[in-house]
Amino acid sequence: MPKKIVEAKVVGQRVLNSSTKLIEVYAPELAELAVPGQFVNVQVFNRTAPLLRRPFGVAAVNKNDGTITMIYRIIGDATKLLAEYCSGDKLSIVGPLGHGFDMNAEHPLIVGGGLGLAPLLYLASAFGKGKAEIVMGGRTADELFWTELYEDLCPVMHLTTDDGSCGTKGTVMAVLPELLASGKYDIVYVCGPVPMMKAVAEAAQEYGVKCQVSLEKYMACGLGACLSCSCSGIGKRLKVCTDGPVFWAEEVGEW
Amino acid sequence: MVNAKLYDGRLAVDIAGLKMQTPVTTASGTFGFGLEFTDFLDLEKVGAVCVKGTTLLPREGNKGQRAVETPSGMLNCVGLENPGSDYFLTETLPKLRKYDVPVIVNIAASSPEEYGELAHKLDVDGVNAVEINISCPNVKQGGIAFGTCPESAAAVVEQVKKNFSKTVITKLSPNVTSITEMALAVEAAGTDAISLINTLIGMKIDIERQRPMLGNITGGLSGPAVRPVAVRMCYEVAQKVHVPIIGMGGIETAEDAIEFFLCGASAIAVGTANFRNPTIAETISHGILNYMDRHGIDKLTDMIGAALPEGSFALRSGKE
């Protein structure tokens, strides 16, 4: 699939919680090409610090309007600068990058936590309203602001929080085994913190359900050149940027 | 060559037999095998593609986090991960040969003899030059161990020269007391050209975990942060050695590249900038032409060494 470098125009930004924002940009070439699970590499500054592009999963695509949406947490210099962008400002974006999710599930179960829920949002939307069920976990109710973004797409939502302030108390693993035991899902898609992905992948294997994981690793180029995001697969080396970021769980040798 | 008239021949350079249509090459380790960038640029408009450091056998590289951004730069400790020379020759080189662009293979090994064996293996059609990597800061054996000792560096160069029939470039490490001493040692050993600089050894601490950020503890610093060091080293070496220099270190724009030409570099390599702007290795040539037009310079070779003290450019003064 061809990769592009485009000047995207910011359509707007929206605050999702105290540290998370959603940005929509006009980039028709990327909107046309990007599939769920792919990411883009965004240059937030045209001087030398911050220097490198920042990778963001594609959280939504609107082909009619020619826009793509990213969701990010304001944590460092680059995301602080990104948070200041206004409608009409331009951003250089490289993408779409990597391989997306397998879309062949008849009864998909999506499992996510934190910013892992961003690329999964596009996945849920691509399956169409009501097709996928979702399990989402957070530390507190405040971290589950995602329900607002998912409620139309996934009417069946299973929520967990570490402190019990919303949904079932515990991690996603507090509800997942029972869901998998029901035998109603054919593929589990997980993106979130590594311990979550590992636990979900193990549980899926135990119940004989196929599982795709979307990994995140520090990367400089996103193009397979810098080898920063290289990791062990089974019998071969994997680059998270070009071989992934989505892998079948059994392909991953090093989390 | 199809591109004989690229840029009207104004940017053409000859690095000890390595003929290039533009002096803009890619720095090893920042451009993959070139094929990763074909969606963004025309490989045939790059002076030469210098591929990822290649070893005799495949290498997995270092564990843990391998890169981190630093002020105007980045640290990496990839540790020479590469699929090995057999894979390069059978899988990668045939794909690269479809493009009319010279190929430089960066080579690393753990003994002078192994460098020789690798160079011999790579002495095939389609490989136009080798760049001896005696300056990788991220591997325990070989690499920088050879790059900081003049005698060891010379031993490696001699072995490669014996085993490779085309242009031999030696890439110097900046992590030395005297870069000119190293440059003179590899010149005496017979290198055809010198490239400089490799990365500077640096560190970053994760203050939340209270541990070094990188899996290999230290890493090589690259990007605009190192450019002034590279320019200075180019300026010093150009006054001492009679072989051509390929300058590199934080080049992001044509203006950056021109600093190196004026300090005696006959060609340059774009490195970390490829990560940020995957079109840069092609577009920078246009900026060099613009500068030449503004300054009434007909050919690139006319400005090489112009900022050196008069009469001190060793390449032009001829060997004693």
Image (cartoon, coloured by chain):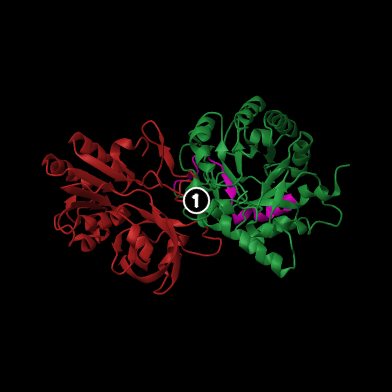
Chain colours: A red, B green
Give the quadrant of residue B184: top right
Looking at the image, the residue that sits furthest to the top is: B113
Vertical side of A240 occupied by A166: above or below = below
Looking at the image, the residue that sits furthest to the right is: B320
Location of residue B163 in the rendering, given as x and y in whole percent from the top left corner: 68, 28
Q: Which residue is mark 1?
A: B37
Crowd tier of the residue under label 1, counting other residues whose Cα lies within 10 Å: few below 14, some 14–19, many 20 or above = many
Q: So how many labels did they put on this image?
A: 1
Q: Which residues are magenta?
A: B209-234
Q: Tell me what residue is drawn at x 66 percent, y 57 percent.
A: B257
Vertical side of A170 occupied by A54: above or below = below
Q: Is residue B93 left or right of residue B130?
A: left
Q: Tell me what residue is drawn at x 61 percent, y 33 percent.
A: B124
Q: Tell me what residue is drawn at x 89 percent, y 42 percent.
A: B320
Location of residue B30 in the rendering, given as x and y in whole percent from the top left corner: 55, 47
Identify which amino acid the numbered label 1 is placed on: Phe
In the structure shown, which secondary structural element does the residue marked by tag 1 occupy? helix
Location of residue A24 in the rendering, given as x and y in whole percent from the top left corner: 34, 67
Give the quadrant of residue B165: top right
Chain letter, disc 1 residue: B
Report if residue B294 is visible in the image: yes
Q: Is residue A232 left or right of residue B152?
A: left
Location of residue A243 in the rendering, given as x and y in whole percent from the top left corner: 38, 43
Q: Tell me what residue is drawn at x 80 percent, y 48 percent.
A: B315
Q: Is residue B160 left or right of residue B239?
A: left
Q: Nearer the viewer, residue B288 or A231?
A: B288
Report if residue A200 is visible in the image: no
Q: Is residue A28 left or right of residue B180?
A: left
Residue A190 inside the magenta-drawn segment: no
